[in-house]
Amino acid sequence: MKMHRADENCGIAQAAVIVGDWWNVLVLREIARGHLRFDVLVAELGLSRKVLAERLTRLVDRGVLRRSLYQRRPERYEYLLTDAGAALLPLLVAMQDWGDRWVLGDGTVTGTAALDGAEHARVHAQIGTRMPDGLVLPSTHGADLPVVAPDCAGTVLFTYPGTGIEWDEPIPGAVGCTLENRLFTDAWPDFRRAGVEVRGVSTQLPHEQADFARAEAVPYPLLSDARYRLAAALRLPTFRGAGRLRLKRLILVIGSEGTVRQVLFPVQDIPAAVTEALRLATASAGVRLGDTEE
């Protein structure tokens, strides 16, 4: 890319050298989703092996990706985000949010989604897919935890905009999240008896979540996606409110092997959604709902 002399000191121009290419952006999108190997990237992106090899080499040379050997004979590599690459995830999520709102939507800021819209289709396409391996996030339980709980019959992962937030102006679908957490807390014993773990996720900072968890005695971990690692990995719907991108409310029911079994989105009736999540999770775990009651 030919650059004007004034662009040499412009961060936007320098970043555009890396992310201004269509295929570079999509390669980063797929690697953020956990598609790390060459053949998988070819299949997901539908581009030629030559073009993909060129883009991967450029991204490695720019320090955005690094290669990790996973097979010696013949040599095969996985492509992983470096720190510089991971720092691009908020940009990818912001691009998706802009596209969802201004290209695929009508420009309205909303915390929910239309049943026939692109966000609805994208989220429900998660059914049958595996969650990315090794994805851990800061938690209110004092350590980074995996998004999918290990050694359990299943995981219910629910995302929410945030607790204790006052919106600058009303945003459809972005109602307070305290009720949702209280309802999951009330249902927590039934989830536990079914061997199902619960994880709540927002883009709030860990200390904000910790303050809320202590005040409300939340028994399950709340995970912070402040760096948008989960949002980028699952291409989760977001909206901008109170100064940052917020996750729209949805619920994933994930099997013990890490595969998404069921999706609830959009979530408009919170009590009904929590009840349905318990029913789906216990059924997925092979437990009848009545068997979880004392």
Image (tube, helix red, strand yellow):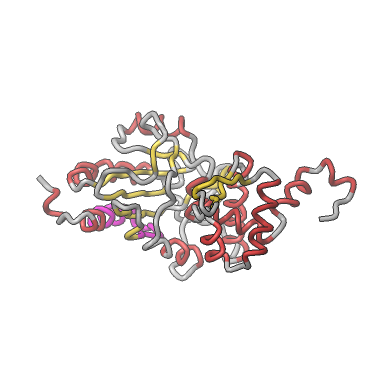
The percent position of residue 148, horizontal first and vertical second, equals 36, 46
Residue 285, quarter of picture: bottom left
- Figure check: 99 above or below 244: below
Question: Would residue 273 be found to the left or right of residue 20 on screen?
Answer: left
184, 194: nearer the viewer = 194
State which quarter of the image contains the C terminus. Answer: top left
115, 42: nearer the viewer = 42
The percent position of residue 215, horizontal first and vertical second, equals 35, 30
Q: Residue at x 39, y 56 (%)?
A: 130
Highlighted magenta segment, given as a residue range: 263-279
Q: Residue at x 41, y 53 (%)?
A: 131
Q: Which residue is drawn at 21% across and 58% down?
A: 283
Question: Would residue 79 be found to the left or right of residue 286 on screen?
Answer: right
State which quarter of the image contains the N terminus. Answer: bottom right
- Farthest residue, direction bottom: 116
Question: Would residue 105 be found to the left or right of residue 234 on screen?
Answer: right
- Farthest residue, direction left: 294
**Residue 278 is covered by the magenta coloring:** yes
Q: Which residue is drawn at 40% across and 31% down?
A: 143
**Residue 42 is covered by the magenta coloring:** no
65, 166: nearer the viewer = 65
The percent position of residue 179, horizontal first and vertical second, equals 33, 44
- Figure check: 93 above or below 47: above
The percent position of residue 262, horizontal first and vertical second, equals 33, 60
- Figure check: 158 above or below 54: above
